Amino acid sequence: MTSRLPESSSKLIEPNPVGLGTFGGVFTPSILTILGVIMYLRFGWVVGQMGLINTLLIVTISTAITFITGLSISAIATDQVVRAGGAYYMISRSLGIETGGAVGIPLYFAQAFSVALYTIGFAESAASALPHLPITATAMASATTALVSALALKSADIAIKAQYVIMAAIIVSLVSLAFGNTAPPTELPAPADAGNVSFWAVLAVFFPAVTGIMSGVNMSGDLKDPKKSIPLGTLAAVGVGYVIYMSIPLLLINRADTDSLIADPLIMRQIAVWGDAILLGVWGATLSSALGSILGAPRVLQALARDNILPKRLRWLGNGHGPSDEPRLGTLFTLGVVLAVVCIGDLDAIAPVLTMFFLTTYMVLNVAAGIEGFLQSPSFRPTFRIPWYVSLFGALGCIAIMFLINPAATVAAALIVLSIYLWLERREIRTTWGDVRQGIWLSLVRAGLLNISDSADPKNWRPHLLVLSGTPTKRWHLIELATDLTHNRGLITVASILPTGARNLKQQEQMRSTLRDYLEKRGIQAFVKLIEATDTSTGAQQLIDTYGIGPLMPNTVLLGDTETSDSNARERYRQIINKCHQAKRNIVILRNPPSHMPQVPKRIDVWWGGLQSNGGLMLILAYLLRTGIRWRSTEIHLKLVVSNQAAAQAAQANLNKLIDTLSIGAQSNIIVAEGRPFDTILRKSSATADLILMGLATPDDKFADYYTSLQKKTLNLPPTIFVLASEDLAFSELLQKE
């Protein structure tokens, strides 16, 4: 089903006069997500396992991938206005709505479920530090979820101000760590894998610590100037995070022994001047991450709803509130999702998949920026430019990290994304914007056309059909035959010749659009060509002379039969055939078209005259038909008429040898004439066939009389195809492997 964007989607392109600035809207949520629980609870383990040099290398590699992604985001954000939805918005406007939705839907759930992960983590750490609290961890997680949601519902601005308090707590914890003392040796036993974990396994553990840049991008719809704030705030957050992550290992390696670093997750608490400041930092990190996710997820949901990606019954989630267009309904919906997940409690099974969705978003953003840069489309004019290969290198890095973290989760995430993509593709959602896919195809087509030889090549021959069908509804059997012959291996052009002056340009375009829709609804992939001419003969000749580009000129013309007795009309028909032959276009004429083709045809009769004449092309056409679903069980019978029994034996042997050589799966059928005329033999032998293929003589001055006699011979027979191989191509070489 095809749907169009509603008028309400225009909200997405309106300016936001009361939006957030760079520091509050992008830098703050990004840096608070980067400086998270992994820094507090796992950084010591990383240093203990790897030592100083390898730890700094892990930090550098991880940050480099995030930094490249930040560069890609900056390039896209400075080329287009980024509205609500952040990463989804950028991807959908670059790679198409199907790709955007395939990434955006999992991204929404990843962010929503992340809120649950963070609040559960906060509740469990609080319960551990304060064991006498008269509340369960689940109840505390639910209450914390409700609190951060209430802040988000109030307004994004208030939520950002709350993050300033959390940032202050994190700063106090880092200062306390910087001026701390040497930790006493731990009494905790060292884990069994102490010092034996591989470099890449440790990198996989650390990498989620630098994946926070989406928190700022997701706030794009609430920013005063996204084109300025997203690049500046995102890259600044990555830079500040890198400085901090490169400094902390220096403190840890000099103030704690290896066993303590590995065994004690809260080793920073032992080092800090004020140990409880580290605990406040852990809580602040979880709450800030939860707040960033509850701010971002509803905005992605809002954008998905406005672009008609969500089912109709959920389109109300696209509504905004107030001058900032805040997604309050989306926030309430997300709150319900999060509370349901909190009640389940155990997210260990799906947590790796969620990380994959964030990394998938990174990867796709890099791909989008890389492709845009590579194509050099005139429409892509970012003020922040990076080489296209840098973005693609970042995409490859994301893929590598995904497999290093969890190969199974990577495959699961890929399957989910692919399933959503295929679902959206089937829905055929129409958009009001263009995307990079057209540019990709144009570049590929250009490269292909320039590399395809103009000379005919038997090995790579494909049927490129020009179907002179007129109005498709009247000669639908021609289009069905063309589809059965090509099976997406060749090109089909449905052509209609209009009387000169019958329609103006606007009417012609409407007719062309109607014909395209008619074909698409019936699953026919074909081009539509309309041409004006004084008569059909002139129009057909114009099409044959002018239609096509380079090596992709139609090589075969598909016609319907003519039943008129008008001598002038038959002469024009002969002129069309003669013109096709002179232009070296193969001719295929369908006579006796069926009202309904049998659903399971059983037999194709090919009346054989040898490989060197029309036989090669007839065999190829029969073979192409049989490769389709409808004709798959069909038998191909090669029928050859000989004068007497003596000639039959030799003909049988030769034909059997030819069939074995061709590997085409045909059966030979030698018929002894015994003085009978050919039309009598034809009627008796092919009366029960589902399709008949016969060769057509080269047009000459007597062709009209010849064709009339051919029509009489085939009168009332099953559907019959007349074939004339006019192309300058040895079809025998296409069939024979030697």
Image (cartoon, rainbow, N blue to C red):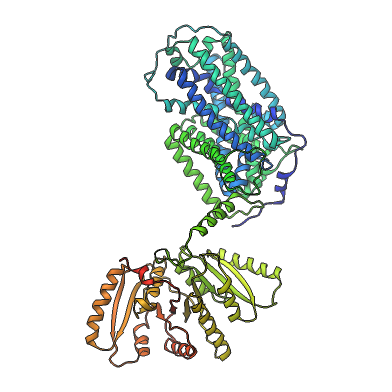
Quadrant where the N terminus is found in the figure: bottom right
Residue 461, located in which quarter of the rendered image?
Answer: bottom left
Residue 191, located in which quarter of the rendered image?
Answer: top left
User: On screen, 684 above or below 541?
Assistant: below
Q: Is residue 306 left or right of residue 692?
A: right
Residue at x 71% of width, y 27% of height: 158
540 or 28: nearer the viewer = 540
User: On screen, 571 above or below 531?
Assistant: below
Res 599 seen here: yes
Residue at x 47% of width, y 44% of height: 415
Q: How many marks?
A: 0
312 or 14: nearer the viewer = 14
Q: Is residue 696 left or right of residue 447?
A: left
Res 143 seen here: no
User: On screen, 712 above or below 461?
Assistant: below
Residue 365, located in which quarter of the rendered image?
Answer: top right
Q: Residue 69: image x %, image y %? A: 57, 35
Q: Residue 530: image x %, image y %? A: 62, 71
User: On screen, 318 above or below 735?
Assistant: above
Q: Residue 232: image x %, image y %? A: 66, 31
Q: Is residue 317 left or right of residue 465?
A: right
714 or 531: nearer the viewer = 531
Q: Residue 58: image x %, image y %? A: 48, 25
